[in-house]
Image (spheres, rainbow, N blue to C red):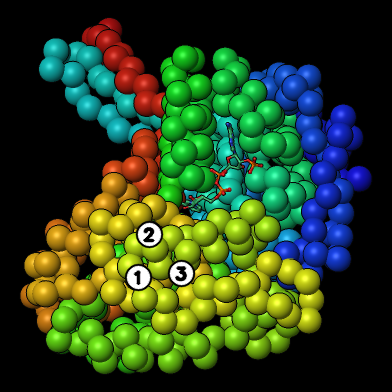
Amino acid sequence: MNKNFIAGEWVDGDSAIENRNPSDISDLIGSYAQASTSQLETALESARAAQKIWARTGLEARQTALMHIGNSLMARADELGELLSREEGKPRAEGRGEVYRAGQFFTYYAAEVLRQIGDNADSVRPDIEIDVRRDPVGVVAVISPWNFPTATAVWKIAPALAFGNAVIWKPANLVPASAVALSEIIAGANLPTGLFNLVMGAGSSIGDALVTSPHIDAITFTGSVETGRRIAAGAITNMTRMQMEMGSKNALAVMDDADIDLAVACAVNGAFGGTGQKCTASSRIIVHDAVYDQFTDKMLAATRALKVGHALEDGTQIGPVVSEGQLSENLDYVALASSEGGEVLCGGERLSMKHDGYYMAPCLIAGTRNDWRINREEMFAPIACIIRASSYQDALDIVNDTPFGLTAGIMTTSLARANHFRRNADTGCVMVNLPTAGTDYHVPFGGRGDSSYGPREQGQYAVDFFTSTKTAYIAVGAVD
Ligand code: NAP
């Protein structure tokens, strides 16, 4: 059984779950311990003690530990990327890319360890100086989703450690193998015993116990809006600091002046990359009336040409969806699209392949309206809906007519429209002539509306969540 990492020890749980490959459900990856609430208490106590040691540890030792973790991830990106693809279902190259990117997050935050510089000022009163510095928050609960099992966790764990905090990590139960692999690397990094803890288990049990615990100081969560709301309601009792990045319903607007081939390439990449299971996926494709038919024909041909297959087989562009439950929800959305009046141009059915897995044909639906449920709710599926717009302004209005606000993109050759869109799309990230998915690690990432709550993640902006500011007043007095 694969174990949890608690107070510096690898420990069994009271029970275990099986982890199977969604590309081939006969492939059992392993069984994974489920942490008990008493083990969680042990993790919380040890994290509290270790955090005090870590906060006093010299900056170079902290920097070296993070650099070691980052370099190990990058060196082992092939092996760990394959494991990630085997349990999550994204094609091998994407799995490898995710692990390598996770390594870059650690080396980036290793450098940030040495850039922790405060402010000082004179008081408005004479002979008083002011020193403004940032202290660690304390013990941070990290809750991550299954779709980017390593990257989402790392873009929380790396800054938490860099800024002097302890971590209790609860990964999604669908992807425990990647969690154990990352934890093994972190366990080998010469951190104080108990500073980093892995507690695997279901969100409704161990996750809930973690986020409602009075012994944590902050929660950083990535997942669905529904879970985010539940966590926020539970955590507010203890006034726990929160950072939440959640779902979305991202739009790509294709203008009449766009390079249509580029627009099709960006739309297909954004809609179906990662089997559409990205918070940044382009699920609403808003197309100007003047190029609607031309764009739709070309996107249909490109969607039909996508190769669906086993995540680890050469040539696979779209892997399986992650689970039977996700697949059945996706098929229900395709049926809903038809009942709402959408025209299913291709895909949308379960595929029978040589391996028994959760395969679905990428689905393109035309003639949809923005007020239909398929364009209001996050589907997290290889399904893209085309919406017709009569003008640039109409397209922008449709882009912004959603409760979410993570990313939005525009395809245009007009500088004026590109600039106007950049400034008026009501989302945390905007893409110009690029897919809505695909972001960097050294700049902030996050959304607006229901997509996001609390301070930004990533880049230097992460410091705001993972530290607490202290303002000290010092009377300088006169010298004899
Ligand atoms: P989810 O069902 O909300 O789960 C996310 C995490 O929360 C999992 O670890 C889950 O554990 C845990 N959890 C569930 N209930 C909990 C509770 N009551 N208390 C504490 N933890 C609880 O989301 P998902 O299906 O894993 O991921 C897909 C969602 O994540 C999509 O909505 C996607 O848009 C979003 N996402 C957002 C971003 C972003 O940066 N904006 C990035 C990636 C994904 P178990 O699953 O083990 O039960």
Residue drawn at (35%, 55%), measured in percent from left and top? Answer: 373
Question: Picture quarter containing residue 254?
Answer: bottom left
Please say if the residues under marks 2 and 3 sit with CB atoms less than 8 Å apart: yes
Camera-near label (1 vs 2) is 1
148 sits left or right of 380 in the view: right
Which quadrant of the structure image shows residue 29?
Answer: bottom right
Q: Which residue is mark 3?
A: 383
Quadrant for the C terminus, please: top left
Q: Name the residue type under label 2.
A: Ile
In 3D space, how far apart are the residues under numbered discs 3 and 1 (Cα atoms)?
12 Å
For the N terminus, the image quarter is: top right
Q: Amino acid at mark 3?
A: Ile
Determine whether the residue tagged by mark 1 lies in a helix, strand or loop. loop
> Residue 27: x, y in percent?
85, 65
Q: Which residue is mark 1?
A: 342
Give the x, y percent position of residue 348.
Answer: 52, 73
Q: Amino acid at mark 1?
A: Gly
Q: Which mark is residue 374?
A: 2
